[in-house]
Amino acid sequence: MSAGKSRTRLWFLWHSWLAMPIWAFLFFICVTGTVAVVSTELMWLVDPSMRASGEGEPLPPSALIAAAEKAAPDGRVTSLSWGGSHMAVGARMAMPDGTFTTAWINPVSGVVQGLSTGNSFRQFFRALHGWLMTFPVGWYLVSAMAVPLVGSLVTGLVVYKKFWKSFYQPRIRWKQAPRVMWGDLHRVAGTWSIWFIAVIAVTSLWFLIYMALIHLGMGLGGSKPPVMLARDQIPVAAASPKPDADAILATAMATLPDMRLRFLGLPGTAYDPATVIGTSGQVPLLPDFIRINPFDASVIVVEGGLDGASGIELTRTIMRALHTGDFGGLPIKLIWFAFGALMSTLIFSGMLIWMKRTARATMEVVRAVKTARASSNA
């Protein structure tokens, strides 16, 4: 190889090495996203206060609120969250100093099992994965990774001939050289992750385009005005009446009897409605929002589901649910976690293969340049 060609090849290798930060960043995004999917479940494993037995009749919301405010007398409960029969109910409380505290309450006994202050592990990892805790720059950096992800999916399918054989004839030569083993693992993981990579890539592109259009003043629309109480619906009293959480929840469950309860939000001001969020049997991907007058427990409006939602609202909700795996309960989360881990392994193995190949080619070019210089100086 001539000295000129060697220098050209060296420049190409420099170009290849400079792509490494992109793939390392994508690997970081995949790992943090995988952890974020099951962040609540991970905290359940390490924090006993979040665990609860599903045996027995669950207490009404008023009893849970009373227990939480007794444990933190200065706090005011703003919402209750249900995560399933295995989890304690989370009562989020506003404190006088402007911070928030979450009380974990056994839904059957009403015992406050622990208090958590500040942002949760779930909030931290979702913020780290979603926007690197630097919005909006981090949002664009993360969602832009959809471009190399789509590119790697398309080019991988073109390069890997008859990839479908890995579905029924997966081959990983564990006892061969590391490069061979990692190559087999990369191909098998890639084949089994095709559908998952496509879902993550498409939803990430949606997040990128949607946010870009909003910042350009060209939002896709679909947003609705906030639901507020009319002035004549607010009672006149010397002291603000406390909302009847039991009546609010009873009204919501009577409106959608098959709804799986997830959240009860109490009003923050006199004009705010109470909000009950759950998932009914019609479409697991689309949660239902029931806005209720907190003073007389009457239904103001039912939102979500397939009724009354615009195409943009449906798309936005479905894209988020598909990206996070936050639908269908724990089984879907575990599937998303498993394929997220597989996708992270795929990227990591690809990085190792690429590094070994590029490093070897780099050494060959460096030796060729040195040899050419030595020959020219002789």
Image (cartoon, grey):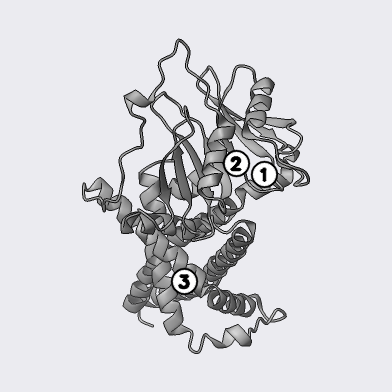
**Marks 2 and 1 close (CB-CB < 8 Å):** yes
274 and 17: which is toward the camera: 274
Q: Is residue 26 above or below residue 70?
A: below
**First in sequence: mark 2 or mark 1?**
1
Vertical side of 186 occupied by 91: above or below? above
Along the horizontal axis of the image, is 48 left or right of 197?
A: right
Q: Is residue 234 shown left or right of residue 62?
A: left
Residue type beneath disc 3: Thr
Quick one: label 1, few (<14), some, or many (20+) residues within 10 Å? some
Pick the front one: 281 or 120: 281
> What number is the disc on residue 121?
2
Q: Quadrant of residue 181?
A: bottom right
Percent across and percent down for residue 290 are 46, 43
Q: What residue did someone put label 3 on?
A: 362
Of mark 1 and mark 3, the one earlier in the sequence is 1
Please, what is the three-letter code of the amino acid marked with disc 2? Phe
Residue 309 image position (x, y, % from top left):
35, 54
Q: Few, some or many C-alpha atoms within 10 Å of disc 2 (few <14, some 14-19, many ≥20)?
A: some
Residue ID for mark 1: 43
